[in-house]
Amino acid sequence: MANRVSLQDIAREAGMHISTVSLALRDDPRLYEETRTRIKAIAARLGYQTNPLVSAWLQQVRKPEMAQAGVGLAFFFGLNASPRVATEPYYQSLVEGARAEAVALGYLTSEVRFGRDDEVRLLKALAQLRYRGVRGVLLFDPAECLTPKVARELEEGFAVVVMLRCGGGARFHRVGTEIGGNVALALQRLRDTGRRRICFPVKPGSMDRVRKEALAAYLGQQQLWPVEEHVPLPAEEVEHDPRLFIPWLRAQKADAVLSVNYLLHDHLINAGYRIPADLGFAHLGVDVNPALSGIVNRGTVVGRTAVFQLAGLIAANRFGCPEIPLNTLVPGIWREALEPPKTPPAPEVSLKPQARPKTGKTVTPVRKPGSQSVTTKRTRKDPASAGGG
């Protein structure tokens, strides 16, 4: 028997537009879950049944639109509360990689920058994205400004990928740098050069996420070494003060330094250390610093990977909060210093001009034929002036 209940009947009963009913019956995530549930309940009560032939035809018609992956992606950058992050080379490489991959995949991108007090503006931005059909969000929030209300809104109908060092907890898929593996690689390269007492001058306690993960990896690797090669962690903040760092380093009799702070290298040079002749040194982020040996984090690859994963979620209609969030980590690579190492400052020398020692040589003027100029002919070659004349 023909189906007597139409979409118009359901729309009239629900008090909504027929297009809203159509989206709800297709479980479109652009609608709130409460709206979808209510409309589906009304359809079931009225005895509505879908026509399989019509459904198959509509799915075929909509397929090309899905392949185009919508109108674009939205990049959410939580930088207003932490402007220092915007100037970090690693952050800049993340953004460059994400933008490049979006262009390569044919997406248009819109960027939203926010801070801790921008909840209302973020909610309005998400509402506009829903209206425009933008369903993919790449989130970078180093200061963890994402409020619970905004996070819940993102869970309703958006595909979200978070770049590491971000907020949002573990509710979304995440892509970032494999800090633990990078620490293990740097330590192994230092040990390959014969270094055995490798220090990590970071005091445990209140640290940023990068230092916490790096410290955990360092302590884990240290357990694999003989006890006499263990270097204790500093009991005070020595990382940012050379007056504390250099005496602590000497007291530990360390022969190498693992660092997340560029300034430590300068402190060592100013203290008279020759690197790597006197002391090994490895930094965990040398992407844009060719003067140091250490790990290239490949932020561009991390950014491209995040957008690639986000595009895959959209193409597969994977919207909302994932049941099992994926944590994709991109390993770094080791790079030796590409520039000659800095040398300690040379000792001060007197700038007072010194008299040239007498050589006891005699000179006689010689006049060139046909010339009025007079040149000087040395009777014996002066080694101090070789190459002159």
Image (tube, rainbow, N blue to C red):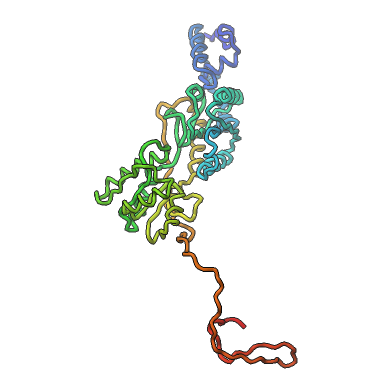
Q: Is residue 321 above or below residue 287?
A: above
Residue 337, image x and y in percent?
A: 45, 57
Q: Which residue is drawn at 52% across and 28% down?
A: 116
User: Viewer-proximal residue, 344 or 99?
Assistant: 344
Instruction: Please say whether residue 147 is visible from this viewpoint.
Output: yes
Instruction: Please say whether residue 57 is visible from this viewpoint.
Output: no
Q: Which residue is drawn at 51% across and 10% down?
A: 43
Q: In this view, does 199 lie above or below 322?
A: below
Q: In this view, does 194 lie to the left or right of 367?
A: left
Residue 236, image x and y in percent?
A: 36, 42
User: Viewer-proximal residue, 259 or 299?
Assistant: 259
Q: How many labels does the image show?
A: 0
Residue 379, image x and y in percent?
A: 58, 92
Q: Which residue is drawn at 48% across and 35% down?
A: 142
> Which residue is situated farthest in the left direction here?
227
Residue 5, image x and y in percent?
A: 55, 8
Residue 189 found in image quarter: bottom left
Q: Is residue 295 left or right of residue 10?
A: left
